[in-house]
Amino acid sequence: MVSVGTIVWLSSELMFFAGLFAMYFTIRQVRPDLWSEHTPTLNVPFATANTIVLVISSVWCQLGVYKAEHGQAARTGSLLNVSGWGMREWYVLTYIFGSLFIAGQVYEYAQLVHDGITLSSDGYGSVFYLTTGFHGMHVTGGLIAFLLIIGRTFTTRHYSHAQATGAVVTSYYWHFVDVVWIALFATIYLLK
Amino acid sequence: MKTESFVFALVGVFGLVMGPIYGIATDWQEPVGPVGLLLAAGLGFMVAFYFWLTGKRIGYRPDDNLDGNIDEAAGEYGDFTPHSWWPLWLGLTSSIVFLGLAVGWWVFAIGAFFGVFALVGWVFERYKGQHAM
């Protein structure tokens, strides 16, 4: 039932991002000149690399879910023996890739602010930072959730069903945020 | 869960049909409608799909039977926290955090500090001590 609740909530999150997409397209419709002026400053190769990092983190997350469903929280062998990794190791790796994405976004923001695009500079700056920023906050929230979920695995001697459920629904959220980013990336960086 | 799945699929079909109609009617000059309607279709189909998947997993329920009786649905429903005070603290600290956005970052920092305790307290409420889940 936890998973059904998570999906229903994620569907409402979809509507939250629908609002952001609607805002983006509306401002672009009204002021196309801002887009032709600012989109050349976007660093598309860098953003593409960042996107790939986030997509790969989803793969690691799914491998962690696989381990969680088989009730394996901890690794069986050494840290170098990847096939023996448990849910914890995969989730830590997911966390590292997620934080790499956020770090990349911070770097990108710094570059754009340097180029004069800020939240209050004009319409383009506002929608750019609002859409990518709200997504970034979702990713950050996901990272916090990963910490809590990893923390929960240490509370019992054996990995419990409730802990596995928590790990699985956190992965739902992570995949959702990942898919939203792909849509945002396509809209902002490819469609321009 | 066929009925539940069907109801949400209806929401999806409505959005999927009305989105393009709205777009054509406004000559694609008004993006809010198509975006909102098509993503509302996403909302409907997403929930419908997951209900369908869950229905396949848990199988037949008395709720699916038109002639079913209420007592057939008796039994265990899962684990629920009987009561918890943590959501109250989490709500209060979240209010301070959002107040901080309007007033100043120092208010935000105070809210975030206490928010950490509220969040960890809630998440680990049933995951500590002898009876940890």
Image (tube, rainbow, N blue to C red):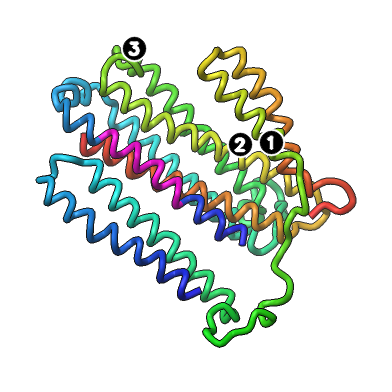
Compare residues A25 and B69 and report the one nearer the observer.
B69
Q: In this view, does A131 lie above or below A62?
A: above
Q: In this view, does A69 lie to the left or right of B76?
A: left
Q: From the image, state whether disc 1 or disc 3 is nearer to you.
A: 1
What's the mark number on residue B103? none
Indicate the chain on which mark 3 is placed.
A
Quarter of the C terminus of chain B within the rendering: bottom right
Position of residue B120 in the picture relative to residue A139 (left or right): right
Q: Mark 3 points at which residue?
A: A114
- CA distance for labels 3 and 2: 29 Å
Give the chain of mark 2.
A
Q: Secondary structure under badge 2?
A: helix
Residue at which label 1 appears? B119
Q: Which region of the structure is painted magenta?
A: A11-24
Looking at the rendered structure, the secondary structure element under dot 1 is: helix
Q: Earlier in the sequence, mark 3 or mark 2?
A: 3
Name the residue beneath numbered marker 2: A144
Crowding near the residue tagged with mark 2, few <14, some 14–19, many ≥20 C-alpha atoms within 10 Å: few
Residue drawn at x 49%, y 70% is: B53
Task: Give how far across and how far down residue B104 sits, in percent.
Answer: 55, 12
Image height check: is B101 above or below A29? Answer: above
The spot of residue B10 in percent (x, y) is 35, 66
Specify the amino acid type for callout 2.
Answer: Ile
Residue B119 drawn at (x, y percent): 69, 36
The residue positioned farthest toward the right in the image shown: B130
Q: Specify the subunit that label 1 lies on.
A: B
Q: Nearer the viewer, mark 3 or mark 2?
A: 2
The amino acid marked with disc number 3 is His
Residue A12 covered by magenta stretch = yes
Of residues A150 and B68, which is closer to you in this image? B68
